[in-house]
Image (cartoon, rainbow, N blue to C red):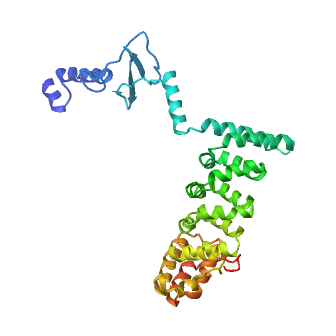
Amino acid sequence: MAKRRGAASGKPTGAGSAGKRKERRASKFGGGSSTPKVKDAGVKKKKSSSVQGKSSGQYQRAGKTDVVEKTGGKTEEKAESKPVKRKSDNEQDKTSQLSKHHKPNSDLIQSLSAEWEKLRPEKVAEGDRKKGLSQLANKVKGKVVDLGSNHKTSRVIQAIIKNGTAAEKAAIFKEITNTESMVLLAKSAYGNFIVRSLLEKSPKKELPRILACLRGRVVPLARHPCGTAVLEAAYSVANSAQRSALIAEFYGPEFALKAQAAIVAGGPSLRLRDALADPGLGGRRAVIGHASRVLAGVWEKGMVASAYIHRVLNEYFQEAPASMVQEAVEALAGDAVLVRMMHTLDG
């Protein structure tokens, strides 16, 4: 009867109670499951007498480093890192020699710069400065074009042009008064200052030789940010006939030759209207078309601040058809451009 009452009331029997006690013990010691916990066999922790970096999880074994990280209760093993190989002294020397090979004047540049810094202060006596400049002039001789493109030695050469003796100036003048050297320096970010110093400081009798080096290169230089500054310097020191010869290159190479011949013969300076009246140049349409294409390449790059460009535009607006003038006006419209053109008579 008692057994039947227990079964009817739903109370656990002896076997059931024992099973539940086993489950409670398993949950207490095994995480709620009667199945024993199996350790991760995929990762084994390396033990060694030379264990380093325990806090960061790095273990060194047999010359290799295993990086072990614990993330979210799991252990992961990263690929072993390779040791950093340092360059030997011989390899460092070779690297230094290669660097000097690519910059053959690096030592000379450092030497010239250091000596020039000693001569720059105002407290240096004038005699000492002259003596120091003479030494610098001897060192740059034969290397003006190479050194002129460096921002440090460009200043040294400019100082020699400004304060050197007549013989020292003449040596620099002789070295760079050829078309290749002059154009190379004119397009250099630091070399163009040397050409501009030469234009400003050279005697008037030497100016034709400098301008001859620029002949035939006026249009490409006008489209270059450094070259246009050189042309502006040349235009500012040139006389009327020399200015006309510079401007003539915008109207075609044939007309530029005729303008130069007229200067040599002592004739009048030629302008755009003279080119339009010359039947040998292909007619009015050909000359105006050439000038339009050249000027478009100039104003598209924003090179419109120079006085010589203002003169070319002034002559072009006077002779070009209304449609071409309108096109040019639209291209030049804008306060930023107009302000840069108001400081000269032609502008």
Q: Which residue shows up at 35% across the image and 18% down it? A: 45
User: Considering depth in this image, is 209 or 229 the residue closer to the camera?
Assistant: 209
| Above or below for 333 versus 208 | below
Residue 320 in the image: state x and y as whole percent. 53, 87
**Residue 316 seen:** no
Farthest residue to the bottom: give it: 322
Expressed as whole percent of the image width and height from the top left, the position of residue 293 reads 48, 76
Q: In the current view of this chain or complex, which residue is farthest to the top?
A: 49
Where 65 sits versus 314, above or below?
Answer: above
Q: Quadrant of the N terminus?
A: top left
When the figure is inspected, residue 145 is found, relative to residue 281, above or below; the finding is above
- Name the side, left or right, on which 131 lies relative to 283: right
- Which quarter of the rendered picture does the C terminus lie within? bottom right
Judge by depth and name the residue closer to the eye, 36 or 29: 36
Residue 80 point in image, percent of width and height: 36, 24
Hey, which quadrant is residue 147 in on the image? Answer: top right
In the displayed structure, 78 sits above or below 52; it is below
Residue 254, given in percent of the width and then of the height, sits at: 51, 75
How many numbered markers are drawn? 0
Residue at 67% over, 80% down: 346
Give left or right: position of 247 versus 51. Answer: right
